Amino acid sequence: MAKYPFLTHRSGSDNLYYKRSVPAELRAPGRPKQVWKSLGTPDRSKAQRAYAAKHAEIELLFEEWRTADNRPVTEAAFDKAAPSALDLPVTPLTPALLRRLADDHYLNIYENDFAWRGGLWLKASADEDAFWRGDIIKHPTNDWQKHKGQSYSYYALLMEEPVLEEVFLYSVYTARRQKLRALRRLYQLGDTRDLEPSADDLLRLRQVGLCDGDRNRLLRKLMQSEIKALEDLTAGDEATFDGIVASQVPTSHESDRKLPTQPAELASVLIEKYIETTSREREWPPKTELRKRSELREFLEICGDKPINAYGQEDGVKFKDTESTLPLYRQQASFKGLSLIDAAKKAEELRNKGQDIEFLSPLTINDKIGSVSLFFEWAKTRTGGVANPVAEQGIQRRKNKRQGKKVHPWTIDELNQMFAAPIYVGCQSESHWKQPGQTILRKSAKFWVPLIGLFSGMRLGEIIQLQVSDVKEKDGIHYFDVTPISVDPADDEAVDADEEKSLKTSSSQRAIPIHKMLFDLGFGEFLDFRRASGSTRLFPEYEKAKDDGSWSKQFSKYFKRFRESVGVKRRGVRFHSLRHNVEDALRNAHVMKEARDAIQGHGENGVSAEYGCGFYLETLNEALQKIAYVGVNFPAARDPEDQAILTTTAS
C-alpha cells in the first residue's frame, strides 16, 4: 500500500492536496462525497510532512460525523409549535446538524471561491487589455499602508514590473479582504440577512425546517463559518504579500531608494488625450492623425495596455523586435486575420523556410518608434515615474543613403510597358480598362495622372486634388498652381471649405510649368472638356478618402493594379518613382539643383531660404521643358501627323 494514498494534485492549483472519499455510511444530504484539503505547497517533500496532520484532521471529522449520526433526538430540544421558515417538517437543530450545516457552508465558500477566481482568470488570460483596464476585477489602487514608519503599496510595487498572474492574484486577495471586512462588520451589527438564501439552500438539501430560534442560531453559525473560510483563504496570501512588502520597504541606510509610485492612467486613455492635444496644437492633417493613432495602437497590441508608468525597456525591445519581423504586406492570405505578434512569427517562419518575405523597412520601423517615443516624452510631462521604453531602440541606417534605396525610377522598358497598355492604345471602356478595345481614355484620370507625374514631378496627392482653376496662364506660360487653397468657382475670392486641399510641406506650394508634351497629347482639349462639364476639379472621379483625408489613396490602389497588369512588378517601382524619373531627367539636362528642388517642391536649406520669392516662372519653364525620355513610345498624338514628335525626345 502506498505511504501517502490520499496525496494528489488538483486542477487549477499548483499546490498538492489531501483527497479522500467519504465512507458510504457517513454520506448524507449536505455532506460532500469527497473531502479536499490543501497541503499549502507544490513541493512533494513538504506536502508529505504536512500529510499526517491533514490525515488526522479528516479522521477526527469522520469521527464527529459518526457521533452525531448516533446521537438521539430529544423532544425538548425544540418547540414544535414555533413557525417554520420553510415549508418543510420542523426538525430540532442538534449540535451535530448545526455542525454539518456549518461545515457544508464552509466547503461551499471554498468551492465558490475556487470557481469565482477560476472564471475571472479565464477572462483575464483571454483579454489582458480588459484586465489591465479593471473591467474584469477591480485593481487595488488604494492599498497604501504604513510599515516601520514608511508608506508602501504592494500594488504599486507589482506595477513597476507588472506580471499578469501576480497582479491578478493580488487583486483576488484584496477583493477577499474587502469582503471579509464587510462580513465582520455585519456580524458586529447582527445583520444576517445576506445569509438567508444560503441557509434555505442548505436546509432544502437536508429536507428539514427550523423554528425561528433555531434558524437564527443557524444564520449566526453560518456567518461565523463564512468568516472562518475567508480568513483561511486569505491567511496564506496575507503572509506572502506582507512579507514581500516588508522586504521591499527601505531601511534607514537605504533612504535614497524611491518607493513605488502610485499607478497612473492607462496608456490607451493617455494616447487619446495625446492625439487630441497634439493634433490641435500642431495642426495635423487627418491622414497624419490616423497614422499616429495606428502606430500607437500597434504598440498597445504588442506590449499590452498598462498604466503609463508600468512600461520598461523590455517593452521597447519587444516592440522593435516584433516590428522588425512584420511582413510588409499583411493582407496576404498567409497573414490575414493574425495578430501583429503572430504575423511576425509567421513571417519569420516562412522566411526561414526559404520563402521570399519582404519585411518592413528600417525607415518605416524608425518612424513608428519615433511616434511612440514622442508620445512617452509627452507623457513624462504629465505623470511622474514614466520611462520612455523605446528611447534607444532606433535602427541605425547605412550612411550611404543611395545604397539599397527603397524607391527606384521607372526604366525605359517599364515606361514602354505602361504606355502600351489598353488605356493608352485602346481598351473596351473605363471600367474594363484591362481589356483591349477601341476606346482611348483621354477624358480619364487613368490616362492623364501618370503623364502629369512623369512631366512635372508632382506628388500623386497634389495631382489628384487639382482644381480646374489651378491650371493657369501667365505671359504665355501655362502652369499648375499647387496651393492648399480651394477656390469657389462661383466666386474667385471665396474659399471652398468642402474641397479643402492639403500639401506635404510649405515648400510644396509652388507654380509648375506644364510641359508641352502634355498639350501635344491633348491636355488642352481635356481641360476644355472639364471646364464645359462644370466640374470644379480636374479629376473628380477620385475623391478624398473618408478615413484619413488622403487625396491619393483611391488612385494609389488602382495604380498598383494597373502597374501589375502591365507586368511592372519590380520592388521599389510605384507611382512615386515618377518623381525620381523627373529628377534624373532634370539632372541629365544639367538643370541646377536649386531649380530642380523648386520644381519638385523640396525645401531650401540655409539662410538663403529666408530671402527672396524663389525662381521666376520663365526660369522654371525653361528648365522643365528640358525633360526628355529618349526611347519611350508615348501614346498616339491627337493627330497622326503629330506622332513623329512623340517618338523622339521631348525638347
Image (cartoon, rainbow, N blue to C red):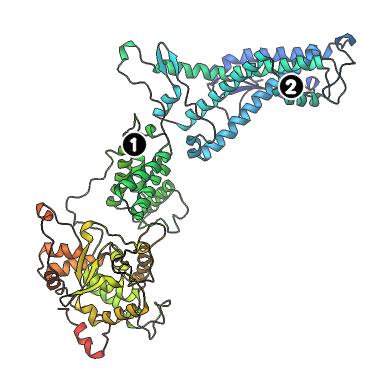
Please indicate whether residue 481 sits to the left or right of residue 497 in the image: left
Percent x, y for residue 67?
79, 11
User: Which type of secondary structure does the marked residue at label 2 adopt?
Assistant: loop
Q: Which mark is residue 379?
A: 1
Q: How many marks?
A: 2
Front residue of 507 and 219: 507
The disc placed on residue 283 is: none
Name the image quarter holding residue 236: top right
Real-space Cα separation, disc 1 to disc 2, in angstroms: 60 Å
Q: What amino acid is at disc 2?
A: Val
Q: Which residue is mark 2?
A: 22
Q: Residue at x 34, y 36 (%)?
A: 379
Question: Residue placed at 43% from the left, 36% from the top?
Answer: 266
Circle 2 crowding by C-alpha within 10 Å: few under 14, some 14–19, many from 20 = some
Using the image as rendered, state which of residue 497 and residue 513 is in the foreground: 497
Q: Is residue 504 left or right of residue 77?
A: left
Res 91 → quadrant:
top right
The amino acid type of the residue labelled 1 equals Ala
Determine the residue positioned at 84% across, 11% down. Answer: 71
Q: Is residue 421 visible?
A: no
Residue 410 as seen in the image, left or right of residue 185 = left
Q: Is residue 76 left or right of residue 253?
A: right
